[in-house]
Image: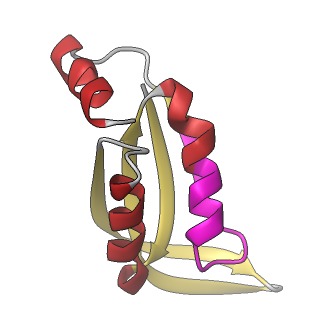
Amino acid sequence: MRIVLTTCSEKESETLVRKLLEERLCACISITNAKSVYWWNGKIEKENEALLIIKTRDELADELIEKIRQIHSYDNPEIIVLNVEKAADKYLKWIGEVTK
C-alpha cells in the first residue's frame, strides 16, 4: 500500500478527487485544510490549500502520479509517495477490491 500526498487549491480539490477515484487509481482520498508557506519565484508565499491524502496499491502509484501531473493546475505540484509498512489486512483487501 502507498500513501500519495499532494496539495492543490481548495477549489480544485473536488475535481482532482473525483477524477482519481473515477479512474479507480485509488481507494480513498482524505481532504484536509492546510496553510502552506513556501518559496516561489524568489519570494515567500502563503496560501490556503487542500492536502489530499490518497490511498492506493503499490502497483498503481506510478500511474496515479502521472495522472496527478496531467490534471493538476500547478506548474510544479507537490507529489510525495510514502510506503506503508503495515496496515490492517481487511483494509488492504478493500483497497485491492475497489481499485483497478
In the drawing, does residue 30 fall left or right of residue 17?
left
Tell me the quarter of the picture where residue 73 sits.
Answer: bottom right
In the drawing, does residue 70 fall left or right of residue 82?
right
Figure quadrant of the N terminus: top left
The tally of labels here is 0
- Foreground residue, 74 or 61? 61
Residue at screen point 37% across, 51% down? 53
Tell me the quarter of the picture where residue 33 sits.
Answer: bottom left
In the drawing, does residue 60 fall left or right of residue 98?
right
Q: Position of residue 45 (x, y in %)?
A: 62, 86
Tell me the quarter of the picture where residue 46 sits.
Answer: bottom right
The vertical placement of 19 against 97, above or below, is below
The colour scheme of the drawn protein is secondary structure
The vertical placement of 25 against 57, above or below, is below
**Highlighted magenta segment, given as a residue range:** 65-81
Identity of the residue furthest to the right in this view: 42
Q: Is residue 77 magenta?
A: yes
Q: Position of residue 52 (x, y in %)?
A: 39, 59
Q: Position of residue 48 (x, y in %)?
A: 41, 82
Let me know if residue 84 appears in the view.
yes
Identity of the residue furthest to the left in this view: 90
